[in-house]
Image (cartoon, rainbow, N blue to C red):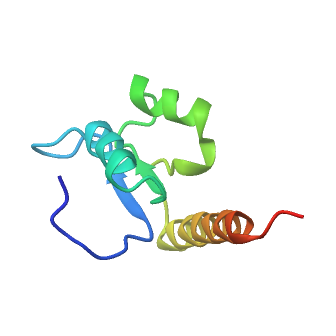
Amino acid sequence: MLSYGGEIKLAIVEIAMPGVNGLDFANQLSIDRPKTPVLYIPAVANSVAAESIMQREPESVLTTPFTSEGLLERVRQILAANKAVARRARKPLR
């Protein structure tokens, strides 16, 4: 699916992208790159897809409208959480 071979630190996905279903893209990304976090930005916050994601992973959804500061803060939160998970995964068991 992905032709880009480098690391993807965060994917920002619109659920209803033109020509592509954002959920299908995110699902395929989770198969191809399971450690890549996804930030979902639904155009319609009360859509079935958005509500389903918000129930499972509320920290992974940023509803519209939002400010650039709000987007930046959410990106920082997700990257920090992902970094913490990676550190715990590398820690040797005692």
Residue at the spot x=50%, y=51% of the render? 62
Can the viewer see residue 26? yes
Q: Nearer the viewer, residue 9 or 34?
A: 34
Q: In which quarter of the image is the C terminus?
A: bottom right
Total numbered labels placed on residues in the image: 0
Q: Is residue 5 left or right of residue 26?
A: left
Residue located 37% across and 36% down the image: 44
Going by the image, does 49 lie left or right of 90? left
Q: Residue 73, relative to residue 60: is it above or below?
A: below
Residue most extreme to the front = 94
In this picture, is 53 found above or below 6?
above
Front residue (pair 59, 64): 59
Q: Residue at x 59, y 73 (%)?
A: 76
Residue lying furthest left in this view? 19
Q: Can residue 65 be seen in this view?
A: no
Q: Where is residue 91 in the image (x, y as percent from the top left)?
A: 76, 70
In the image shown, does 35 or 24 lie closer to the viewer?
35
Expressed as whole percent of the image width and height from the top left, the position of residue 11 reads 38, 61
Q: Is residue 42 left or right of residue 87?
A: left
- Image quarter of residue 82: bottom right
Tell me: residue 65, above or below residue 55. below
Residue drawn where x is 62% and y is 49% of the image = 59
Task: Single out the residue that lies furthest toward the right.
Answer: 94
Q: Where is residue 38 in the image (x, y as percent from the top left)?
A: 45, 54
**Direction from residue 12 to residue 77 in the image, left or right:** right
Q: Position of residue 43 (x, y in %)?
A: 34, 43
